[in-house]
Amino acid sequence: MSASFDADAELGAFRRAQRERCRALRRGAGQALRDAVVANVNRVVDAMLLERPHACMAFYWPIHDEIALLSAMLRAAERGAAVALPVVVAHDAPLVFRSWRKDIAMEPGTWNIPVPTATAVELDPCALFVPLVGYDDAGYRLGNGGGFYDRTLAVRVPRPLAIGVGFEALRMHSIRPHDHDMPMDLVVTEASLDEALIATRLRSRR
């Protein structure tokens, strides 16, 4: 058995254990904590629309106790943003993004996650709100393990602003990222947000 195989197996075990730990923490998060995160997401949405009126923003449909952002999606749409949801088209492919509005037709997608039907317009978002299982001090994200957001961020030009959404309790020193892992540009939690930092991150992706 090679040393590289041992290292890969050990890293896989580490990540599985961290996912289990973080998912348990996420399940235990109460509504008040979730509302605080959504309030900060709303602040980022508002700041983005000040920088880029009518920006296209991609959100997500929550699974596994992820933070629900429906109210933020409605807020963004009401303020003039184009809103999109991610769609898995193949297990080894980047995500595509279909237009969403509150009255749009939806259908079950991969893992029965609701997605806009294939008749919805495909959009090119400048920002992605990305659910976090865990994250580290460098902004690297521990996700569900499919690698969809990493593949998406790696091929989109210009790269969208990647905004992780989670809780402070999910932070760790390091997720021990692979070479292909893509860090978030900003992580939004229930903690207070630095308005200057938000503006700087948004302007960096103009």
Image (cartoon, helix red, strand yellow):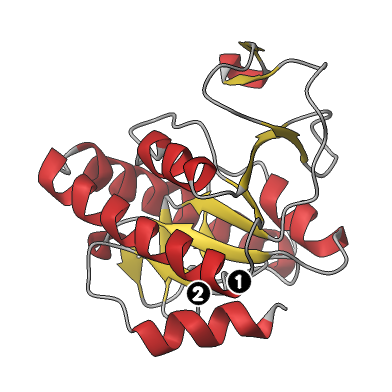
Q: Report the side of 81 relative to 47 (left or right).
A: right
Residue, disc 1 = 183
Instruction: Estimate the x, y position of residue 183 in percent, counting from the top left.
Output: 60, 71
Instruction: Estimate the x, y position of residue 9 in percent, counting from the top left.
Output: 60, 54
Query: Is residue 74 positioned above or below 199 on the image?
Result: above
First-in-chain label (2 vs 1): 2
Q: Nearer the viewer, residue 89 or 70?
A: 70
Q: Report the side of 176 relative to 38 (left or right).
A: right
Q: Nearer the viewer, residue 6 or 111?
A: 111
Quarter-of-image position of residue 189: bottom left
Residue, disc 2 = 139
Query: Which kind of residue does numbered mark 1 sit on?
Result: Pro
Number of marks present in the image shown: 2
Query: Which kind of residue does numbered mark 2 sit on?
Result: Gly
Residue drawn at the location 38% of the way across and 57% of the way down: 41
Q: Is residue 42 visible?
A: yes
Dot 1: few (<14), some (14–19), or many (≥20) neighbours within 10 Å? many
Residue drawn at the location 40% of the way across and 44% of the way down: 72
Q: Nearer the viewer, residue 13 or 201?
A: 201
The Cα–Cα distance between marks 2 and 1, rounded to whole angstroms, is 5 Å
Q: Report the side of 112 relative to 117 (left or right).
A: left
Residue drawn at the location 58% of the way across and 77% of the way down: 202
Q: Are marks 2 and 1 in contact (CB under 8 Å)?
A: yes
Q: Nearer the viewer, residue 9 or 38?
A: 38
Quarter-of-image position of residue 31: top left
